[in-house]
Image (spheres, grey):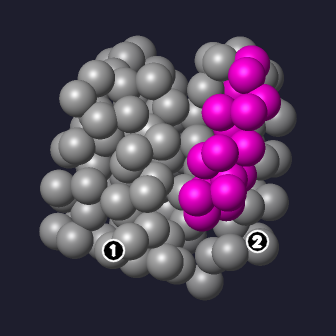
Amino acid sequence: MAKGKVLIADDSKFFQTYVQNLVESIGFEVAGKVSDGQEAVEILEELNPDLIFLDINMPRMTGIEAVERIIEKNEDAIIIMMTSVSDILIVQRCMDLGAANYIVKNSSEPEIKEIINQTWELYGD
C-alpha cells in the first residue's frame, strides 16, 4: 500500500520523471504531474494529493504564488519546494507561506529521499 498520493509541479519533464521515480521507490503513488503552479492549483481538489512537490521557478504561476493559493485552499497541505536557486531568502519566503520543507535539485538521491521521508514522518498521516 502506498504511503500517500503525490502531485509534482515542475516545468522540466526530466525533473518530473526524476522525482516520480524517487517517490515511487520509497512507497508513494504519483497522482499527477503538471508543468506550472497554475495547473497545480487547478488540479488540487480533483487529485487531493497527500504531498505536493513545487518547483519555485515555473511559468504562468511560480511556486511561491502556488504555495499561497494552495495553503488558502488547504492549510494542512504538505508542500515540499524544489529549487535550483541557492537564494535562501526565496526558500524562506516559501516556508513562511506554509511550505513544509525544500529540496535543492542538485542534492544526491539519498539526501532527497531523506528529506521526503523526514517531511512525511513529521506531517504525513
Check residue 121 in the rendering and tell me which mark sits there, or answer none. Answer: 2
- How crowded pointer 1 is (Cα within 10 Å; few <14, some 14-19, many 20+) is rated as few
Q: Give the magenta-colored segment's residue range.
A: 86-104
**Would you place residue 46 above or below residue 66 in this image?**
below
Residue placed most toward the observer, 107 or 94: 94
- The image quadrant of residue 103 is top right
| Tag 1: amino acid | Lys
Residue drawn at x 68%, y 37% is 91
For residue 5, say whether it is visible: no
Question: Was residue 111 drawn as part of the magenta stretch in this picture?
Answer: no
Q: Position of residue 61 (x, y in %)?
A: 29, 35
Residue placed most toward the observer, 62 or 123: 62
Identify residue for label 1. Answer: 73
Q: Position of residue 16 (x, y in %)?
A: 40, 29
Q: Position of residue 72 (x, y in %)?
A: 38, 71
| Tag 2: amino acid | Glu
Residue drawn at x 77%, y 73% is 122
Judging from the image, what secondary structure is the residue with disc 2 in?
A: helix
- How crowded pointer 2 is (Cα within 10 Å; few <14, some 14-19, many 20+) is rated as few
- The image quadrant of residue 60 is top left
Residue drawn at x 28%, y 23% is 59
- The image quadrant of residue 88 is top right
Left or right: 34 in relation to 42: right
Left or right: 68 in relation to 117: left
**Would you place residue 10 above or below residue 54 in this image?**
above
Q: Nearer the viewer, mark 2 or mark 1?
A: 1
Q: Position of residue 22 (x, y in %)?
A: 58, 38
Left or right: 113 in relation to 6: right
Residue drawn at x 43%, y 57% is 68
State how many labels appear: 2
Judging from the image, what secondary structure is the residue with disc 1 in?
A: helix
